[in-house]
Amino acid sequence: MVDFKRSTKNRGFYCRMKFLHKHGRHHDNKNNTNSSFYYRYFKWILWVCLSFYFFISYLLTSSHNKTTSLPTTKISSSKTNFISRALFESNNSVLQKPILTKASISSELKNLKIYIYDLPSKYNKDWLSNKRCSNHLFASEVAIHKALMESDVRTLDPLEADFFFVPVYVSCNFSTINGFPALGHARPLLSSAIQLISSQMPFWNRSNGGSDHIFVASHDYGACFHAMEHVAIANGIPEFMKKSIILQTFGVEFLHPCQNVENVLIPPYISPESIRSTLEMLPLNDRRDIWVFFRGKMEVHPKNVSGRFYSKKVRTVIWDTFNRHKKFYLKRHRFNGYQTEIARSTFCLCPLGWAPWSPRLVESIALGCVPVIIADGIRLPFSSTVRWPDISLRVAEKDVGDLANILEHVAATNLTTIQRNLWNPVNRQAMMFNNQIQHGDATWQVLHSLSQMLHRSYRVSKINSQFNFDA
């Protein structure tokens, strides 16, 4: 038979075969008593072990639940699941917003009407032969034109128009050397368009040089049409555009020659389809496993041939200080899937380049990463809708070397609040240029801003003058 006895050497159980009586029977009452005792002892030990296991499991679960409710620098798996799902669902709700309705135009946009000049294709459509023209960071000039063409704001009768949109694409002349937009043709192309519309129709001249006409200047320094600030300032805004309304990405909080014109500040263009595609690729339980992220140009020796320092050396300081920091994920080379890295990140650095604004600002908001803006004096778009202080961080250029401590302090204090504000779909909606205008999107924000400028409309001013005369 098999007899289980406690080993005196290793405290375990072992099996020991006992030889049977020569008649095949074994009548040993003492051994039977011992077997019963060891069986009860084994059951008691097993019960104690199982009880201890379940008790420890309970304590660990309780401790975990308490920890995840605190605003710490680490995000638990369960919280990450909630964050990812909330971000995905809110973005889907943004993408499914209703298009601009006539009721909205009447109640919120004050019955705004815009006439779009039908210019020869050399001013716009011909440039679309290059697919980059409608998808790069300056492509808001294309997106706004396309959205307005399909909108109920558009009127085919120039006599009932409040404003006149001049659709000239000047950002699609890409250099064969470096691939960047070359802007040398911008001034003569725009001048040619104005000569055309002013010679064929009366609306430019009647408004004292185009005060109710709208242009898009989505480049580094707006209607100054140059990527280098000192050259842009020297050239200034063309005289023929100084009385018009400019939709531009460049904006600062102090006097600057390149914004010395009536303007509406707009975000750089990021394709809504690329954002949607990135979100759909991400699993709902995706973790934000990158603490601080930046991918882009970070020059080791930032002084260029003009003698100017790229990014005012800010990006160089970021690289020199943090490229070996274990919490900073910094990359200097291009990667087509970089938006997935943004979606995995807690903080996304948005330092200035040649100009203060950056497309990373839009991508960070759209993908739920807290933007860290490093550009002194930058003016941000649609501030009446987007509460920038509640969804982003500003770090002075001189303090960039202390980024790690600054972000650790934010994480320990109000990171959870900033993230909650950031996930509000209103913010992401305001940054997106859609093919059809949706309530609250970037083109809608432009229209809302224009509805506050109706005093510049020749038609409105004429109606007001007539009303005052009759009164």
Image (cartoon, helix red, strand yellow):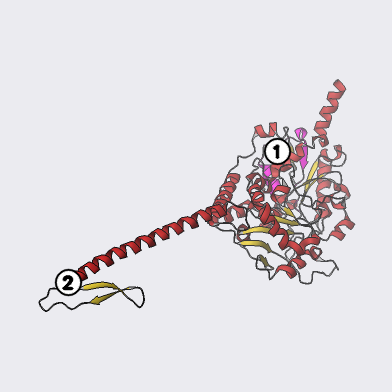
Which corner quadrant holds the N terminus?
bottom left
Q: Depth check: 418 or 276 in front?
A: 418
- Horizontal relation, residue 290 to residue 17: left or right: right
Q: Secondary structure at mark 1?
A: loop
Q: Residue at x 67, y 34 (%)?
A: 104
Name the kind of residue labelled 1 in the image.
Arg
Task: Please give the residue where the numbered disc 2 appears in the rendered image.
Answer: 28
Whole-percent x and y of residue 69? Answer: 58, 51
Answer few, some or many: residues within 10 Å of disc 1's Cα (few below 14, many 20 plus, some between 14 and 19).
many
Whole-percent x and y of residue 149? Answer: 68, 42
| Residue 223 in sight here | yes
Which corner quadrant holds the C terminus?
top right
Vertical order, 24 against 55 (above or below): below
Q: In the image as oriented, which residue stretches furthest toward the left?
A: 23
In which image quadrant can residue 393 be found? bottom right
Q: Secondary structure at mark 2?
A: loop
Task: Please give the residue where the numbered disc 1 appears in the rendered image.
Answer: 154
Res. 382 mark: none
Asked if residue 214 lies in the magenta stretch, the reply is: no
Q: Kindly report which numbered mark, 1 or 2, lies closer to the viewer in this rendering.
A: 2
Whole-percent x and y of residue 428? Answer: 65, 48
Q: Which residues are magenta?
A: 143-169
| Residue 353 in sight here | no
In which image quadrant can residue 187 be found? bottom right
Evaluate if marks 1 and 2 touch, with contact meaning CB atoms under 8 Å apart: no
C-alpha gap between disc 1 and disc 2 = 106 Å
In which image quadrant can residue 150 be found? top right
- Horizontal relation, residue 408 to residue 309: left or right: left
Name the kind of residue labelled 2 in the image.
Asp
Asked if residue 153 lies in the magenta stretch, the reply is: yes
Q: Depth check: 465 or 276 in front?
A: 276
- Horizontal relation, residue 427 to residue 195: left or right: left
